[in-house]
Image: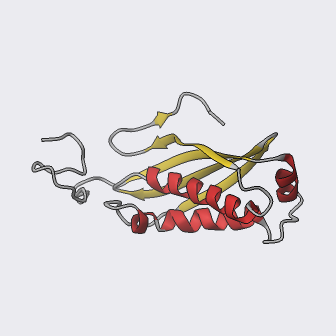
Amino acid sequence: MSKLTHIDGKGAAHMVDISAKENSVREAKAEGYIGMGPDVLEAIKANSMKKGDVLATARIAGIMAAKKTSDMIPLCHPLALSKVAVDFEFRDDGIRVQSTARLTGKTGVEMEALTAVSIALLTIYDMSKAMQKDMVIRDIRLLSKTGGKSGHWTAAESLA
């Protein structure tokens, strides 16, 4: 009926059976951006937010979220991740967040990388909203993935 992997021949949603797949090293990188005013950006840089160290908290939140992706997104397989990294880059009008997720296994880690970025961005927002409520989270996307049957894929260019 459908070429979608999470839909069976009768149109019902199901978890994909990956038991016959070969293990391979799989890695995914994702990015996202949060725009904010210069006063908020400076407070984060100076680590002077009343709620504490925004970037350290966002990094931990992103890593924890990647590890819990299958609890939040239906039909995702629980994965034994070997690496999750969350990094930040200050821009003139905000912060770019990038994540990397890696494992040796039977299924990809794209959702884990995207989840890490999303939750890190939401954590930055949560810890900074007392100073600015109209921050904008945008451009969350997959940058690259390697491993598995489909091999290597890279996005054309960075948006943020």
Farthest bottom residue in view: 51
* Picture quarter with the C terminus: top right
Choose between 88 and 140: the one closer to the eye: 140
Residue 125, percent from left and from top = 68, 58
Horizontal side of 143 relative to 49 (left or right) equals left
The chosen color scheme is: secondary structure
Residue 75: x percent and y percent? 31, 60
Position of residue 71 in the picture relative to residue 120 (left or right): left
Q: Residue furthest front?
A: 133
Q: Residue at x 59, y 64 (%)?
A: 63
Residue at the spot 53% in from the left edge and 65% down from the top edge = 65
Instruction: Give residue 16's quadrant in the image.
Output: bottom left
Residue 67 location in percent, x, y? 50, 67
Is 67 rendered above or below residue 146?
below
Residue 119 falls in image quadrant:
bottom right
120 relative to 2, above or below: below
Q: Is residue 79 visible?
A: no
Residue 1 sits in quarter: top left
Residue 140 visible in the shown view: yes
